[in-house]
Image: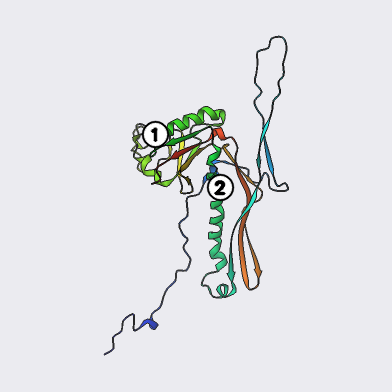
Amino acid sequence: MALVNQTTALRLLNEIWANTPEYTVNNTRGFTKSIWDTGSTYIGTGYKVHIPIIATVAAAAYAGSVSYTANTETEITATPTVAYSAVQIQEDVLLTAFVDPVKGYGPALAEGLYQKPDIDGLSLFAGFTSNDSTDAGDFTAAIFQGLVAKILANGGDKVQLGQLDGWYHPLKWDAIMAIADFYSASVRGEDNSAAKTGNIGTAFGVNFNFTANVQTSTTLRNLIVSKKSMVLVRKNLPKLEMERTDLTTKVVASMMYAIVVLHQATGGMHRITTLT
């Protein structure tokens, strides 16, 4: 009598691989949709983009004559640079892989490339000098509301409640959802509605979004932005290219862009000291 188990019969057993690869977890994207994206406007020649800012010419009561004073204008300058993600696939892998490696790595390259502008934008937290508020402990409604008030006061006509986007670290979701002002339908003015059970949506004029791309520099640097608080200047659209050389295939995803703070007073930083 012979004993047959998975150890003794190993060479008779078949292993199965999925027909398509699965991709790893990535941080939530979308920050660039909250700011001004110039799209194809500046695609073409020119390595710097200058955006002039004209100050308002104040009106005065007429008293028999008209006087003139100098109107000194300013500008914002963006210098786009190239970002890329790439893989070099050897010939033996190309010939033996059960899926096309070029197609398999394409989404991973694109995801890495698309993540970078979000990270770059959320890294500009130090540019918001007019509206910078700190919660010395965890998230509190008072500090949040005070920051929104600062943005409204300093941002003027470029800020509208309901059109502000808040980008917070996911670790702050529980602290926010523990505050009745954010989950109570009655407080939020939603008559005959159930309490919020997870998706905060818009609260106090701010559309809440959560991503781990929020930067940590001693404190969590959460941002509340308006459309014109930053500008994304593109010099080309994202592209994927291939090159064959020395029995390898190089696959490169790239784009050229810059993100700069435009009207810093129309956005703000909500620092939170508790990092968990």
Q: Secondary structure at mark 1?
A: helix
Q: Position of residue 42 (x, y in %)?
A: 68, 45
Q: Residue tagged by mark 1?
A: 141
Q: Which residue shows up at 70% across the image and 47% down it?
A: 47
Q: Amino acid at mark 2?
A: Asp
Answer yes or no: is residue 198 visible.
Answer: no
Visible residue check, residue 179: yes
Q: Does residue 141 sit above or below 217 in this rendering?
A: above
**Three-letter amino acid code at the position of disc 1:** Ala
- The circle on residue 120 is 2
**Total tally of numbered discs in the picture:** 2
Lower position in the chain sequence, tag 1 or tag 2:
2
Front residue of 61/134: it is 134
Name the outermost residue toward the top: 64
What is the distance, in whole Å, between disc 1 and disc 2 at their CAs? 27 Å
- Position of residue 7 in the picture relative to residue 239 (left or right): left
In the picture provided, is 8 more to the left or to the right than 20? left
